[in-house]
Amino acid sequence: MNRRLPIWDHPVLNKEFRQRMRIARTPWIIFLYLGIAGTLIFAYMFLIAHPAGVFHPEGSRFLFIGLSIIQLVLLAFVVPGLTAGVISGERERQTLSVLLTMPLSSGGIILSKWIAALAFVILLILSSLPLYASVFLFGGVSPAELLYTIVHLLVTVCFWGALGVFFSTLIRRTGVAMVTTYCTVAMIMVFLPVALYFINQFYERFVDRPPSPSPLVVELLPGLHPVMTQLSVFYGEMAGMDGGIDIYWMYVAVYAVLSAVLLIAASHLLSPVRRKKKSSSPGSPEGDS
């Protein structure tokens, strides 16, 4: 029997969509998310408006940037929690072995779990577009900046989701997989700026000629950080480096490739053939049952 099924007709994907999208709390979560975001937007507009009732375009731009960064940080907490248990949860419920005996490819299972886990997050991002677009009424933000922001959020969400799926496949326990995913995301969000700061301090302290070109690592690290690359959309001086590389597109390319690599690695780890060889080797533990 052919194990390759179209992804849009994949039974695992259909099952996950039904479970995630038909629960009663889904519309309420969307309502609360948009309600809170909309309240913050209009409250900010009201508070910083001039006495004559005029909203300055610069305030609109600052609001757009703030919402983009806040949403990016919030997604760093939401996405790992949605994806770090998609495979390990099946293992703990002892349904993974049953899933692997079905005429489904391991790649299809991984991709279906990944898409279903991210579908709700992407729905939140897309549903917030009218709120982001509301700043166009006051100027200060171009349509290109809105497009770049959405692409950046989608690439970031896809990478964090692939990271969670990979650790969920690699690690047997959901709790450990979730902690590992959160720690990895935290290292990207926190460790990279700290490392960049200390490298800059070391370079300024021990290099005798400051006008000399910066080391390559100092030029590349900002292109791996979500917030720095997001800010580069709005501040052109951050977008380019001495070598002429745009850190925004560097970020998109690197994390798109890493997402694909993580999903392929997770598919390889889940492969029944690999699991069978591993379980048949001397001294290896039994498979999930």
Image (spheres, rainbow, N blue to C red):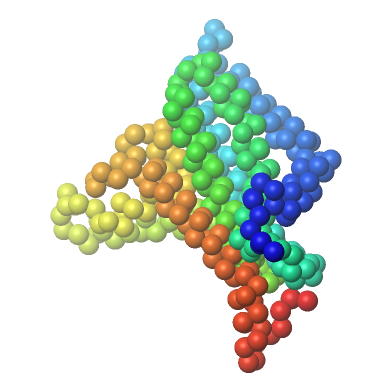
Looking at the image, residue 225 sits to the left or right of residue 36; the answer is: left
Q: Residue furthest right?
A: 24
Q: Residue at x 62, y 31 (%)?
A: 128
Q: Residue furthest top?
A: 52
Give x and y (percent) for residue 211.
Answer: 17, 49
Residue 66 vs 169, above or below: the answer is above
Q: Quadrant of residue 183?
A: bottom right
Q: How many marks?
A: 0
Location of the N terminus (image quadrant): bottom right
Q: Residue furthest bottom?
A: 282
Q: Residue at x 15, y 54 (%)?
A: 209
Residue 119 visible somewhere in the drawing: yes
Give x and y (percent) for residue 181.
Answer: 59, 61
Q: Quadrant of residue 221?
A: bottom left
Q: Residue at x 62, y 88 (%)?
A: 281
> Which of the pair 227/164 is nearer the observer?
164
